Image: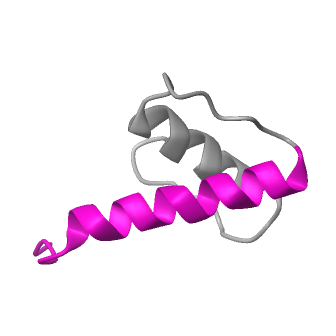
Amino acid sequence: MKKLKNEKELVKKAIAEGMKYGEKRGVVEFEPTDSATEKIEYIYRLLVHDKIIQPSWGRNRK
C-alpha cells in the first residue's frame, strides 16, 4: 500500500484522539513514558472492546 504524504501527522492525531477517548471514559491514564506502539495497541483494543471498530484478523487469526 502506498504511504500517505502526511501519514506521521495523521498517526499523531489519531493517537491524541484515542487518548482523549480512553481518558474521557475513565479507563486509562497514559504515562509520558508509554511508547506510541503501546498507546496504539491499547486504543485499538479499547475501540474493539467498545465495538466501535471490528477486530483486524490479519496476523493474529487462529
Query: Quick check: 13 above or below 35?
Result: below
Extreme-top residue of the structure: 33
Could you tell me residue 25's position as x and y percent? Answer: 88, 55
**Left or right of 50 in this view: 52:** left
- For image coordinates 62% across by 59% down, the residue present is 18
Nearer-the-camera pick, 29 or 1: 29
Extreme-right residue of the structure: 26
**Magenta span covers which residues?**
1-26
Query: Quick check: 36 above or below 14?
Result: above
**Left or right of 33 in this view: 11:** left
Residue 10 shown in magenta: yes
- For image coordinates 66% across by 70% down, the residue present is 53
- For image coordinates 24% across by 61% down, the residue present is 8
Nearer-the-camera pick, 3 or 26: 26
- For image coordinates 67% across by 47% down, the residue present is 45
Question: Magenta-highlighted stretch: main secondary structure?
Answer: helix
**Left or right of 46 in this view: 26:** right
How many marks are shown on the rendered structure? 0
Could you tell me residue 21's position as x and y percent? Answer: 73, 61
Residue 25 visible to an observer of this rendering: yes
State the image quarter where residue 48 is shown: bottom right
Residue 62 visible to an observer of this rendering: no
Could you tell me residue 36's position as x and y percent? Answer: 41, 39
Residue 27 shown in magenta: no
Query: Quick check: 61 above or below 18?
Result: above
Could you tell me residue 41's position as x and y percent? Answer: 54, 41
